[in-house]
Image (cartoon, rainbow, N blue to C red):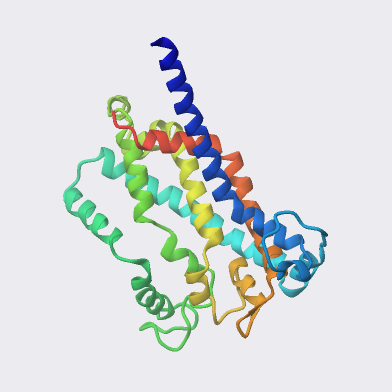
Amino acid sequence: MKANRKIGRFAGKFMIYVLLVFFAIVFTLPFYWSVLTSFRPDSEIFSVGINLLPTSVTTEHYERAFRVIPFLRYSINTLCITVMIIATNLIFCSLAGYAFAKLQFIGRKVVYRIMLLSVMIPGTVLMIPQFLILARFPLVGGNNIVGQGGHGFSGNFMGVVLPTAISVFNILFMRSFYISMPDELGEAARIDGAGELKTFFRVYVPLSKPALATLSVFCFQAGWNSFMWPSIILRSGEFKVLSQGLQSFVVNNNVDYGPMMAATVCAMLPVIVVFMFAQKYFIEGIAFSGTKS
């Protein structure tokens, strides 16, 4: 019986490892194929069949990619937008999550339900209203008091930041994290005479580093990889982001795959580096946010 149990446990663990290896290969294969394509000459990219190992290696695609688009300038633009998105979400979403988790105020349940309902609205439905509001924003970008005569936030990097400065998903994520933390911490701080802001910044923020790190990774990935909204709001200006630069390799429905894959690999590297450094806090934040005291 003991031998059968050991065999069964070994077989179970073996199957789990087989599945993990299989899914790891499935998820890493597209990235490997992109890297492979970026170093292959054009003759091998369009060759018939699947070859997982290149017969020859070239850096020509990387040289062409950096010649076609101002990669450094686009990267700096994207980084500025991403940093602002991270900062605004960390401040506002953590404060809102704390308020919904630990404070009692009038209309709390109503506002929370409205937020949940807003999650069900597809983001594409809101793009046109958001664009009209930002383009006709009063006293910005040459607009008058009624929002006419100029372009507002259209073509301005703030037009990308403002709609993403606060995310309902991020508020719900931080709320679930603060719910898992004991109320006694805040009550002890209030007994000592601390106000709500002091209680939040002195007591709860130091304990919420895993959740804040996880939120930072989410925001960095969303901001760095954002394509649809920057393409809409920055279409008329000179301020471009990295994802828009990849469009330069598509001309008349013809794709220059080599340089595009080279630029894509370079664009993916910051996200991978950030995740590697924040992996520990990322896993802790996911674990804590799913636990309730």
Residue beneath the point at 43% across and 61% down: 164
Residue beneath the point at 44% across and 12% down: 3
Q: Position of residue 103 (x, y in %)?
A: 24, 40
Q: Is residue 5 left or right of residue 33?
A: left
Q: Depth check: 27 or 10 in front?
A: 10
Residue beneath the point at 70% across and 54% down: 52
Q: Position of residue 150 (x, y in %)?
A: 47, 85
Quadrant that contains the C terminus: top left
Q: Position of residue 162 (x, y in %)?
A: 44, 65
Q: Depth check: 48 or 223 in front?
A: 48
211 over 69 or under it: above or below: above
The image quadrant of residue 268 is: bottom right
Q: Is residue 37 left or right of residue 1?
A: right
Quadrant that contains the N terminus: top left
Q: Position of residue 283 (x, y in %)?
A: 48, 36
255 over 97 or under it: above or below: below
Residue beneath the point at 52% across and 57% down: 84
Q: Is residue 246 left or right of residue 202?
A: right
